[in-house]
Image (spheres, rainbow, N blue to C red):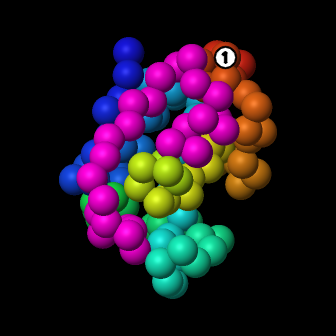
Amino acid sequence: MKIVINNYRKIFSIQKEFNRMFNGLKIGFYAKPNTSGGAPSEKLVMHSSKTLQECRVVSKKGAIEILPTMNISELKENFRNVFGLSVDIFRKAGDATNENPLSDKLNLGEINQEYA
């Protein structure tokens, strides 16, 4: 199973599909930087009805796939390189989300099994 992501996907849709695939994890998107090439915001995007395109400063075409075999670092790097966006992966606990991002070295499929 994989998730294919492009500019036109809405954040809530990506988060929902990610949660279906990895029900013990949550993906969080950080707000866009203030300027092109600027440092990413430390604020998570709360208006999840926006598309990925609306959350970016630099616009270029591209797509990525999210696979269970990926490390968190690979996923974050793909979002950064293709979309210019910063993301983090968090552990879910019932309806709540742990506010501390998980280690970049962890494999999505393995860590999901641990927290599911």
Above or below, 36 against 8 in this view is: below
Residue 66 can be seen in this image: yes
Above or below, 72 against 89 in this view is: above
Magenta span of residues: 53-78
The residue shown at (43%, 34%) is 18
Residue 94 can be seen in this image: no
Q: Position of residue 15 (x, y in %)?
A: 41, 44
Q: Indicate yes or no whether the magenta region holds residue 87.
A: no
Residue sitting farthest toward the left? 8
> Which kind of residue does numbered mark 1 sit on?
Glu
Residue sitting farthest toward the bottom? 34
Secondary element type, mark 1:
helix
Q: Position of residue 3 (x, y in %)?
A: 36, 29
Residue 60's quadrant in the figure? bottom left
Q: Disc 1 marks which residue? A: 110
Above or below, 74 against 61 in this view is: above
